[in-house]
């Protein structure tokens, strides 16, 4: 009797981190998809370091799904990838994504096209079946019957959402159902500063609790705080005020110039429209 063997994924189990720009780009591609398309398929770009795959960018690839087959526009994929390498040569193809709930019957065929080892398959549930746009990452493992291959199975791996503070502010705004307007640079800076003050207050409270004996000391936290404080550049108050004021003035100048450019473009557009009418 033949024995079905299961080949586990590489050890240790790989994990992945996802930047928020990839998530929003996939959702934007889904909203802008052709009317006849049920889902969006595309390429994931990023890098691998210490066994952790970091997904930093993505782009959609046109495709057709007649019957149970999947046909990708390979020329479009190759052209987009070559253009991307000219801008970000350190970001390579790390897998592919698709919208929808879980993997489908044709996922293995597309997975074979991205023949890097091992490619990541990212799924985004744009149908909100569980009340949210759940995102999952998979790798492909193989089953065999005796000496011959039998089937392939997608196995879910750990996925973290990685973002810096500026991205977190924008993500919190876009996650809300309704918003009046997107925050400008100053509003984003204000939100980040308030969050920084909140974190500093939490640190103050923890240190005071440890000193007063209300909380048990943690050597790892203490070393982390000491390293962070040692990494902060020490400025005199006058020097810091001058540097900060110059940065603020530069930001105001850029904001003013961008407003002038937008105004000029609007005037030119109106003049062109009037000239066509006349």
Image: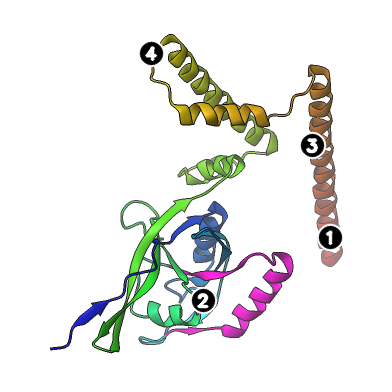
The earlier-in-sequence mark between 3 and 2 is 2
| Position of residue 202 in the picture relative to residue 140 (left or right) | right
The earlier-in-sequence mark between 3 and 4 is 4
Q: Quadrant of the N terminus?
A: bottom left
Q: Residue 71: x, y in percent?
A: 48, 85
The earlier-in-sequence mark between 3 and 1 is 3
Residue at the disc numbered 1: 274
Residue at the disc numbered 3: 251
Number of residue marks: 4
The earlier-in-sequence mark between 1 and 4 is 4
Q: Nearer the viewer, mark 3 or mark 1?
A: 3
Label 1 – label 2 distance at C-alpha: 55 Å
Q: Is residue 228 above or below residue 161?
A: above
Label 3 – label 2 distance at C-alpha: 43 Å
- Determine contact: label 3, label 1, CB under 8 Å: no
Label 4 – label 2 distance at C-alpha: 53 Å
Element class at badge 2: loop
The earlier-in-sequence mark between 4 and 2 is 2
Q: Residue 24: x, y in percent?
A: 53, 56
In the foreground, 174 or 263: 174
Residue occupying the point 82% across, 47% down:
263
Residue occupying the point 84% across, 24% down:
242
Find residue 62 and report its image quarter. bottom right
Q: Nearer the viewer, mark 3 or mark 2?
A: 2
Residue at the disc numbered 4: 214
Q: Residue 178: x, y in percent?
A: 48, 43
Residue at the disc numbered 2: 116
Label 1 – label 4 distance at C-alpha: 74 Å
Q: Nearer the viewer, mark 1 or mark 4?
A: 4
Q: Is residue 157 above or below residue 141?
A: above
Q: Which residues are magenta?
A: 70-98
Q: Nearer the viewer, mark 4 or mark 2?
A: 4
């Amino acid at each position: 009797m033949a024995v079905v063997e299961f080949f586990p994924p590489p050890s240790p189990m790989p994990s992945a981190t996802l930047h928020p720009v990839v998530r929003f780009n996939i959702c934007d591609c889904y909203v802008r998809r052709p009317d006849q398309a049920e889902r969006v398929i595309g390429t994931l770009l990023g890098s691998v370091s210490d066994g952790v795959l970091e997904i930093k960018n993505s782009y959609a690839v046109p495709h057709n799904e007649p019957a149970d087959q999947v046909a990708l526009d390979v020329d479009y994929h190759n052209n987009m990838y070559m253009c991307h390498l000219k801008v970000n040569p350190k970001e390579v193809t790390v897998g592919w994504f698709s919208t929808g709930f879980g993997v489908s019957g044709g996922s293995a065929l597309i997975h074979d096209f991205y023949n890097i080892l091992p490619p990541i398959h990212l799924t985004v549930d744009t149908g909100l079946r569980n009340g949210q746009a759940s995102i999952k990452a998979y790798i492909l493992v193989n089953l065999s019957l005796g000496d011959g291959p039998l089937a392939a199975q997608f196995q879910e791996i750990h996925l973290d959402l990685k973002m810096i503070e500026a991205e977190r502010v924008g993500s919190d705004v876009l996650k809300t159902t309704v918003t009046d307007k997107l925050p400008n640079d100053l509003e984003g800076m204000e939100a980040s500063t308030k969050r920084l003050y909140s974190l500093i207050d939490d640190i103050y409270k923890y240190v005071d609790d440890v000193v007063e004996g209300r909380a048990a000391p943690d050597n790892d936290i203490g070393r982390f705080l000491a390293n962070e404080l040692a990494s902060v550049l020490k400025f005199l108050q006058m020097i810091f005020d001058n540097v900060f004021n110059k940065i603020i003035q530069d930001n105001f100048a850029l904001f003013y110039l961008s407003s002038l450019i937008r105004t000029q473009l609007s005037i030119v557009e109106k003049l062109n429209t009037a000239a066509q009418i006349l």
